[in-house]
Amino acid sequence: MSGQAVRQHRQHPQTAQRGASQPNEPPARQRNGHFYIDETCIGCGACDHACPGKVDAVYRVDDDFLGRFAIVIEECIDCGFCVPLCPVDCIHDAREEGIIEGAGGYTKIKELQAWAEAR
Amino acid sequence: MGQPSCTPNDIKPLPVALPLNEEGLAFYEKKYQRDYNQWTEILQRNVERMSRGSLSLEWMNTDGSAWGKRAKPSSRGLTYSDVNKLPTSGEMPATATWMNFTPRGSIRDRYREEMPVIDDYTVVSRDELWAGNVVTLYEEAVARQWSATRDIPWGELEALPEDLEKASCQLFTFLTEVEFVAGDFPAKWLYRIPQDFLEVKSFLATQLMDEARHQEVFRKRALAGGGLLHASPGFEWALKAILDAPTHTMGTFLLNLLGEGLILSIFRSGEMIAKTHVDKEIFRRTLQDEARHVSYGVLELKNYLDTHPDRAKALEEMHRFADVGEQIILTAFTEATVIEPVAILLGGGLDKIEHGLEGMLKVWSMFIEEYLQRCERAGFDRRARCKIPVDAPW
């Protein structure tokens, strides 16, 4: 799975339901969050459980062999609780840094993947 | 209910001296002579009260405590983070002084003088074991447990050509050795940590369980492919160095950050190394567990360095330790029992091992870069001192 895919913010199924605006449900949030996880995530999940329970914006990306996590921006409330718990500094605030490419050793797996694909 | 055969008056303390032949039991008994008077007094007090037919009910007295504030679950359930918000949970001390089994948050001060002391609780400083993510990693670990018996599709394991099967069995033999120390290390320190640091002990217990499952899954995989192959002296020395680390933080650095980091790099390469979908599933599941251990190791070291009163001294000590640790991990990682089977699997066969060694160059480079990145995150820059060459020695 590419880093690009990890940076994309999947629409959470619950968000989709809220968008349907059932009569007695609160309106969907109008403002998206700004935090995202880059491709260097190692999949430890510390961020998942740091996310306030009612928010639950962090999820493990389906079908990613590396078990990486992503943030649903429609759910994220920009609390930033997840950021200091990350062991590889892969959670960023797009307002401060923009969208940055992952860097460091954890991106080197792409070289191995490319080598394997070229065989 | 029939008449009890024993009344409170029949209960007596053990005799002070009980002749025993078995050396171990005699030693145990001798050790308990030391505490004999203390618990004999407690026993006699209890017996006297019961004999009088009176009740204590002292345990219902909540004076001096915040008892009565109820813990409320969040939408995830009732997590440690939820209960730790309450004053009744008790504050984790910077230095533990309760060397027994009294729970943090319990009414215990009035009993302090009567309590036994567990001499083995030696890691008394919070900053030698705490990591900012340890509570959430514990919750994640509990949520992600899996079974090596049921969750791996063993019945679908395909037969491989002999060279690939032997390479797989050798790799899984080596990984079993690694997981032995990965289990023994947290076990060694778990019982040296006082109960006030419950959350850390709980996380280490999940690490221990993870490693038990890894030992199981790798052993089963080797046996399902024909059998275990060769033990590795170079790796065994590295594993011993981890177990012998002088402090919890140093050992956690060597095991979680460096050693398990290396294993995580191999597991993350599992899509390319595995030659069956069963092996891919094994790597996929184990890498998620390993990631938590690596994560704890990084932030534990960071916390240790950030909170140390003499950071420069702490850094230099860690550097001296890492100088040795890296050398021994380098010895381990150059063992034929590790490099060659992985190269055969990466290349696709014994006749393609040269090609596989090219792939191993990339695994090596990835491992070193990942390791140095983790060190930087912990505030421990090893780039100038790292004893493991950035380029593989072939």
Image (tube, helix red, strand yellow):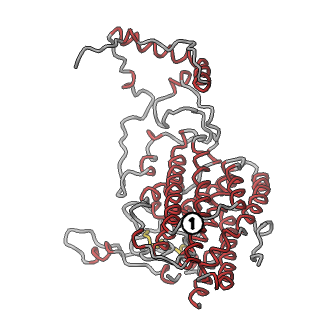
Above or below, B122 relative to A72: above
- Chain ID, mark 1: B
Q: Nearer the viewer, residue A79 or B236?
A: B236
Q: Could you say which quadrant of the image residue A109 lies in?
A: bottom right
Q: Could you say which quadrant of the image residue B343 lies in?
A: bottom right
- Quadrant where the C terminus of chain A sits is bottom right
Q: How many marks?
A: 1
**In this picture, residue B132 sits left or right of residue B89:** right
Name the residue that disc number 1 marks: B172
Going 52% across and 12% down the picture, which residue do you hit?
B15
Q: Which of B363 and B331 is in front in this view?
A: B331
SS for tag 1? helix
Q: At which x and y percent is residue A49?
A: 45, 60
Above or below, A27 relative to B2: below
Q: Nearer the viewer, residue B208 or B356?
A: B356
Q: At which x and y percent is residue B34?
A: 61, 19
Going 57% across and 44% down the picture, which residue do you hit?
B190
Going 80% across and 56% down the picture, which residue do you hit?
B320
Q: Nearer the viewer, residue B63 or B258?
A: B258
**In this picture, residue B186 sits left or right of residue B79:** right
Name of the residue lying farthest toward the bottom: A118
Q: At which x and y percent is residue B340?
A: 67, 74
Specify whether residue B374 is in view: yes
Q: At which x and y percent is residue B133?
A: 54, 57
Above or below, B76 relative to A88: above
- Neighbor class of circle 1 (other Cα within 10 Å; few <14, some 14-19, many 20+) is many
Q: Could you say which quadrant of the image residue B60 lies in?
A: top left
Specify whether residue B146 is in view: no
**In this picture, residue A53 sits left or right of residue B111:** left
Three-letter amino acid code at disc 1? Phe
